Image: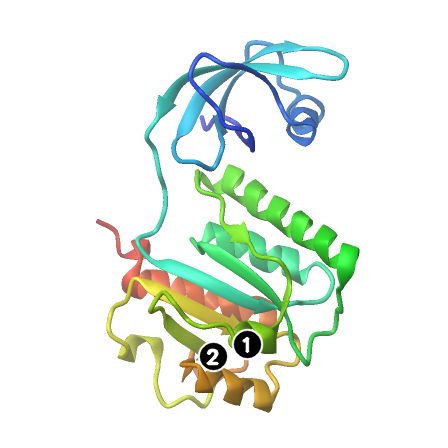
Amino acid sequence: MNLPRFYCREALAPGAHIDLPEPVARHAVRVLRLPPGAAVVLFDGRGGEYEARIERIERDRVVAALGAWRDVERESPLAVTLIQAVQAGEKMDFTIQKAVELGVTHIVPVDSRRSVTRLAGERAGRRVAHWQGVAASACEQCGRNQVPQVAPLARLDSWLARPATDGALRLILAPDAGQALADLPPVRNVQMLIGAEGGLDPQEIVAAQQVGFQAVGLGPRVLRTETAALAALAAMQALWGDFRGG
């Protein structure tokens, strides 16, 4: 039986007694109905995970006692940064959740010309914080101990103007591309740009290609924005990542 897993942002240590963060405590007691003494797993995103038990439950706090640290990681050898144009409604939550399950390491939300949803100021900050929470929850579910960072929202043209520093393979998806993922040599570092509901504007595609993005195809069909990144991530994990086993 898999133990409940919870993410705690504060640094953890063996033998410590900590108050669980309020959302974690609420979920543990009100949703999972964990009693005192229940075994759980805690992780702080700094690597590995901790054995722990619910020590006591009070009206406004839940205290956990930490046990041994375990050097356990479930990261892919393939580092993928997803540059995702902001999607409408709950699609962005869905994409982030599933991308984390599929091993993405960084998420960069961008405002593109065809984005239906427009965010700015405090509203943008709140959404990024929400998406970071979605990423953390996905890690709790799938067993990852490294929480992918969700970057502050940026304009796509501004992000493309930044210098590339990590030598990553840069990809955009296009049904009519002359090459497929399988045609590319194995890599360990990828940046993948995905458009919003209406795809990328032609001028955005040109701007991306001018800074090293190359088009690849995932078959002849046009994929929805919430399908495209996930299909590509699964294909890359099968070709170059941990779907290969071993």
User: Can residue 228 be seen from the camera position used here?
Assistant: yes
How far is mark 1 from mark 2, CA to CA?
A: 9 Å
Q: Amino acid at mark 2?
A: Leu
**91 or 125, nearer to the observer:** 125
Q: Whole-percent x and y of residue 74?
A: 36, 42
Q: Whole-percent x and y of residue 61?
A: 70, 17
User: Can residue 230 be seen from the camera position used here?
Assistant: no
Q: For the residue labelled by badge 2, is the local secondary structure a helix, a strand or a loop?
A: strand
Q: Residue at x 77, y 13 (%)?
A: 59
Q: Is residue 88 above or below residue 181?
A: above
Residue 151 is tagged as none
Q: Is residue 229 above or below residue 68?
A: below
The quadrant of the picture occupied by the N terminus is top left
Residue 173 is tagged as 2
Q: Amino acid at mark 1?
A: Leu
**202 or 100, nearer to the observer:** 202
Q: Residue at x 34, y 63 (%)?
A: 189
Q: Whole-percent x and y of residue 126?
A: 73, 51
Q: Whole-percent x and y of residue 18?
A: 57, 17
Looking at the image, residue 32 sits to the left or right of residue 183; the answer is: right
Q: For the residue labelled by badge 1, is the local secondary structure a helix, a strand or a loop?
A: loop
Q: Is residue 237 above or below residue 68?
A: below
Residue 24: quadrant of the picture? top right
From the image, tell me which residue sits under label 1: 223
Foreground disc of the pair 1, 2: 2
Looking at the image, residue 59 sits to the left or right of residue 20; the answer is: right
Q: Kindly indicate whether the residue at mark 2 contacts the one at mark 1 (C-beta within 8 angstroms).
A: yes
